[in-house]
């Protein structure tokens, strides 16, 4: 499998240099990481890499650690700079990951993640209270099966067997009127294979994920490996319930609707997730300390991103995100473009707003933070528009 990973990468692969044993000096890849420590202080994985810890590992664990860091080495401008390859990487390589997790999530890595889907005050979290019309609301969670490698280390066979496993689950969903839908695939030769035009339409409708072989981070990490084999999407006719298969995590399970009551979307997602976990024969990967295990450490804990498309023309004057980010950051909110991560904002100043926190925060509090943040952003937008 390691060679399958190596074969999939068409970028500098550390294994090509690790084999050049340089007994009397640091091996070149470690030297490169140390150079990056100087040149890229914002790259968390590089900053948390410790050469002494690395040299204390046997060669197998050294390979596992560098495999996890490959994306951040190839793309020094990364923020997180690493992805796990096996669900237990977070435990087996704990000295490294505990530092990186603590650096990103800003929490004491000794704390333990607790899951809780309830909204503390039972509120519907209705954004109409801010005078807003129905908006596009979306809440997604990432999940990975414990008995498969993570997407960064899967072989093509792993990817297609994941797709087959989910075919059985989607069959069972047909019995639930709220969740009955269609599965479409990108796998060449799959009976439900999409045409390129159908695929592009589903991406434009925010139902399907973007082409993974266009993302340098995912290519270096091996997550885009064997593209587009084993990738697909399940969705209900009204697009209110969607499951991605084989994107950054084995599954991205999401509910999306135009409305104002955030709690309704959260409750629908929670019951759908429970239905899927019951229907699938295998458990999801969980860590005692870090909760839900996800490929990217930024998604650990809940794997949840709760977002709203919010029109903020005065806070994004001239297409600049500086002002809106200045207000969003202290509220714990991130700003993305209309097509999601690494895409531009809408021409009318509509942005994708979501809490950054995923770990050491409950599902209910993530959604409550989004609700509170929307109220603050709308207030700031109205202050600017009234001047
Ligand atoms: P993720 O949310 O899974 O981390 P992205 O940020 O790339 O991934 O978003 C994935 C897709 O979901 C994109 O097409 C994006 O536009 C869409 N999306 C995210 N939030 C919303 C929302 N509130 N309403 C509609 N589409 C959304
Ligand atoms: N390439 C990653 C992105 C981290 C967050 N986004 C994810 N997981 N989609 C980085 O290190 O910047």
Image (spheres, rainbow, N blue to C red):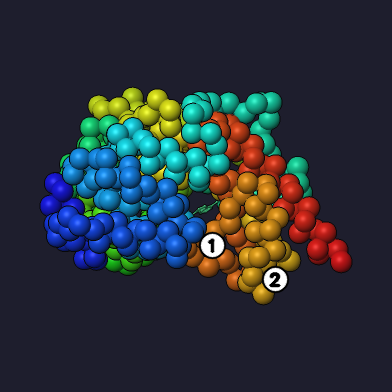
The image shows residue 138 at horizontal and vertical percentages of: 53, 46
Is 62 situated left or right of 109 in this image? left
Q: Which residue is mark 1?
A: 337
Q: How far across and how far down the image is residue 3, in percent?
A: 12, 52
Nearer the observer, 314 or 102? 102
Mark number, residue 173: none
Query: Residue at left 53%, top 67%?
Result: 344
Does the beta carbon of the residue at mark 1 sit less than 8 Å from ligand 1? yes
Is 328 positioned to the left or the right of 106 in the image? right
With respect to residue 306, does 383 lie above or below?
A: below
Mark 2, secondary structure of its residue: helix
Query: Can you give x and y, in whole percent of width and height, for residue 158 in the image?
Result: 18, 44
Choose the circle earlier in sequence order: 1 or 2: 2
Camera-side residue: 151 or 253?
151
Residue 104: horizontal and vertical position, in percent?
50, 46
Residue 147 visible within the image: yes
Depth order, front residue of 41/356? 41
- Residue 226 picture quarter: bottom left
Residue under label 2 = 317
């Amino acid at each position: 499998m390691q060679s399958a990973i190596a074969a999939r990468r068409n970028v500098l692969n550390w294994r090509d240099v690790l084999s050049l044993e340089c007994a009397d000096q640091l091996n070149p890849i470690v030297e490169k990481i140390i150079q990056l420590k100087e040149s890229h202080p914002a790259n968390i994985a590089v900053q948390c890499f410790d050469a002494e810890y690395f040299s204390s590992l046997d060669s197998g664990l050294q390979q596992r650690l560098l495999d996890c860091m490959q994306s951040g080495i190839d793309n020094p401008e990364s923020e997180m700079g690493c992805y796990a390859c096996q669900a237990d990487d977070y435990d087996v390589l704990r000295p490294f990951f505990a530092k990186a997790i603590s650096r990103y999530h800003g929490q004491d890595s000794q704390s333990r993640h607790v899951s809780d889907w309830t909204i503390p005050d039972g509120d519907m979290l209705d954004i109409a209270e801010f005078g807003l019309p129905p908006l596009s609301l979306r809440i997604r969670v990432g999940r990975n099966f414990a008995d498969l490698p993570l997407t960064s280390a899967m072989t093509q066979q792993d990817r297609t067997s994941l797709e087959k496993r989910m075919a059985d689950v989607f069959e069972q969903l047909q019995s639930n009127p709220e969740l009955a839908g269609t599965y479409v695939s990108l796998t060449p030769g799959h009976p439900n294979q999409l045409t390129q035009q159908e695929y592009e339409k589903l991406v434009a409708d925010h139902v399907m994920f973007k082409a993974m072989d266009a993302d340098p981070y995912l290519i270096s990490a091996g997550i885009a490996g064997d593209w587009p084999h084993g990738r697909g999407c399940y969705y209900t006719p009204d697009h209110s319930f969607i499951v991605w298969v084989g994107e950054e995590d084995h599954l991205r399970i999401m509910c999306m609707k135009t409305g104002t009551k955030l709690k309704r979307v959260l409750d629908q997602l929670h019951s759908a997730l429970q239905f899927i976990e019951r229907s699938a024969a295998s458990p999801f990967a969980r860590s005692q300390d870090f909760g839900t295990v996800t490929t990217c450490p930024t998604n650990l804990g809940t794997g949840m991103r709760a977002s709203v498309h919010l029109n903020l023309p005065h806070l994004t004057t001239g297409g600049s995100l500086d002002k809106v980010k200045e207000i969003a950051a202290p509220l714990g909110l991130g700003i993305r473009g209309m097509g999601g991560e690494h895409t531009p904002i809408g021409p009318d100043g509509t942005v994708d707003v979501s809490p950054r926190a995923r770990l050491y925060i409950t599902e209910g509090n993530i959604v409550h933070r989004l609700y509170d943040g929307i109220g603050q952003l709308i207030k700031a937008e109205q202050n600017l528009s009234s001047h």
